[in-house]
Image (cartoon, rainbow, N blue to C red):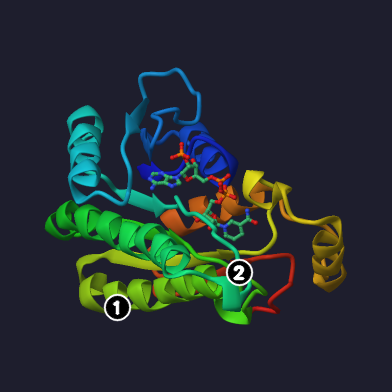
Amino acid sequence: MFISGASRGIGQAVAAAFFEAGWNVATLDRRGAGPGITDPRVAQLTGSITSTEEVDAAFRAAEAAFGPVEALVANAGIVADRPLLRMSDADFAATAATNLAGTFRQVRRAARSMVARRRGAIILIGSVVGSIGGIGQANYAASKAALVGLARSVAREVGARGITANVIAPGFIETDMTADLAPQVRAAYLERIPAGRFGAVDDVAQAALFLANAPYVNGAVLPVDGGLGMGH
Ligand code: NDP
């Protein structure tokens, strides 16, 4: 399997879960840090999903190490939260370039061998705010909402080739990305989560493993949010 953004947070947990389930794991992040698993079944690659060349090179390296990629988890993403009236073009462009175009790039490259082999699972990491919105997150929420259209188009286009394309929509998961949120923002979220707790990275990892092994689930958005979005 190939996963972007596995050097920490959700991606690190997804990489570990697939590794523990017996998969070969190729990871891509900008520092080449990977999930920190030293094993011949893990290849920690360096590059940015904002570069077609670097994504292609990473896939070539992954294929050289482990053969064709059977599952993609396009997980790398960024936030650049800002109130709407203060959100710059650069804030908007940066989230679109990483979260949307970066994901598209990985999907296109992964699909190449999946189409030829007539099997594969494409899993995109969206967000609950792609459906319910988020204050100060016009750029981020739009980039994540767009992943639903991307996945569903891919599902329609190559579904008959045995390929699935689904989106996981995490809610509030405890990672570096959410660590800096103000206490009052955290409290306000918690109040709206029926599960009564924030999510753990492994909650998302288990959903990704499920989708990698679910050949008749296609074009779905799977919320992993403790009920925050009520299934959207
Ligand atoms: P983190 O910020 O903890 O980790 C982000 C990961 O993405 C890091 O490994 C980072 O590595 C990598 N990354 C960022 N930009 C690039 C890039 N251009 N190329 C390659 N790798 C990159 O995020 P989370 O674990 O919290 O989030 C993971 C995904 O889940 C994201 O898509 C996020 O939007 C989504 N999500 C998270 C939620 C949460 O509550 N935490 C909720 C909903 C969705 P490096 O910096 O080394 O490149």
Residue 72: mark: none
Along the line of sight, the residue nearer the viewer: 139 or 165: 139
Q: What amino acid is found at the position of numbered circle 1 in the picture? A: Ser
Q: Residues within 10 Å of mark 2 (few under 14, many from 20)?
A: many
Image height of 158 relative to 13, above or below: below
Residue at 73% in and 72% down? 228
- Whether disc 2's CB lies below 8 Å from ligand 1 is answered no
User: In the picture provided, is 110 more to the left or to the right than 165?
Assistant: left
Quadrant in which the N terminus appears: top left
| Residue at disc 2, secondary structure | strand
Which residue does the numbered mark 2 point to in the structure image? 223
Q: What amino acid is found at the position of numbered circle 2 in the picture? A: Pro
Which residue does the numbered mark 1 point to in the structure image? 153
Image height of 13 relative to 167, above or below: above
Q: Quadrant of residue 170?
A: bottom right
As measured in the structure, the alpha-carbon distance from the residue carrying label 1 to the one carrying label 2 is 19 Å
Along the line of sight, the residue nearer the viewer: 96 or 129: 96
Residue at 54% in and 60% down? 80
User: Residue 142: x percent and y percent?
Assistant: 48, 75
